[in-house]
Amino acid sequence: MRLFTVDSFTDTPFKGNPAGVCVLESKLTDDAYIDIAQEINLSETAFVYKEKGTYQLKWFTPTKEVDLCGHATLATAKILFEKYGYADEVIAFETKSGVLTVRKVDGGLEMNFPIGNASVYEGEDKILEAFLNEKPLAIILDNHWCIIELDSDEAVKNLEPNLNLLLSHSKKSFVVTAKSSSKKYDFISRFFGPAIGIDEDPVTGSAHCYLANYWSKKLAKNILIGYQASKRGGIVECEIIDNNRVLLRGNCVIMSELLIEWDI
């Protein structure tokens, strides 16, 4: 077992979203995954191992397994390419969200993910209005996801979240977004998920599966640049492609390899 920390969706140390990456010789129990994720105490830790010649990839927050995590997938590919000498241009991972691939591209890595399809919610949501202190322009929902559009990027940046309100909501993952006023970006966003152990996530790849689809339709563009306006900040380049897929591009910085002095 080798254990790394990696800053994803950035080329600058201490920016982007930090992830743990645990490279295993074989799979562990769910209790062991949770114990390690809690010890690392980042928003997600990725666990990767080979089974019958194929990489298996799992993601855990400090409290539970999740179905999809972008920044920890990017971080895992970075480790396999640079620390394990993976020779091919594309790595394929078997995951709870199907087969995901990561490709080397100029200036970083490119993930091929399923697009996020959500439905517009037409009713009122008093919890969200109290959380935002305003009425959102749009709410779109899918499974545990709730994407909320506000009328300005300043409203997104200045939002002071009351996370207890979100804990009472039926959804678990909340993305607040707006069109960017900066020419450098097409849209900005922030992510909150207190019910899954993440108060605010620095940069959320899986959220951009939804954001790319939503803003591509609104802005009539297939390639978009998203900025996640957390304290650390991070940039995700998104491209809508055929077959309900989206490409998410970014870079990573390997921050540390941890010396393990315990047994599972």
Image (cartoon, rainbow, N blue to C red):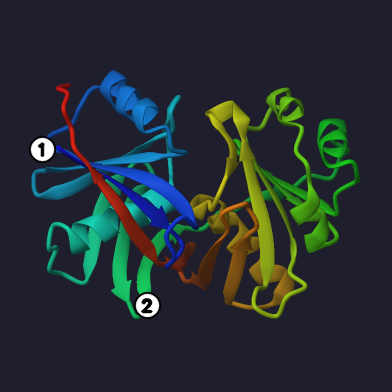
How far from the left and from the top, in percent, is residue 92? 24, 57
Q: Using the numbered discs, state the Cα–Cα distance from disc 2 to disc 1 in whole angstroms.
A: 30 Å
Residue 85 figure quarter = bottom left
Where disc 2 sits, the SS reads loop
Residues 239 and 26: in front is: 26
Quick check: 167 above or below 230?
above
Q: Which of the labelled discs sits on residue 107, or is there none?
A: 2
Q: Which residue is mark 1?
A: 25
Indicate left or right for 196 with 139 as reference: left
Quick check: 66 above or below 137?
above
Q: Which quarter of the figure is the N terminus placed in? A: top left
- Which is closer to the viewer, label 2 or label 1? 2
Quick check: 153 above or below 22?
below
Callout 1: 10 Å neighbours few (<14), some, many (20+)?
A: few
User: Do residues under tags 2 and 1 come within 8 Å of each other at their CB atoms?
Assistant: no
Residues 96 and 33: in front is: 33
The amino acid type, in three-letter code, at marker 2 is: Gly
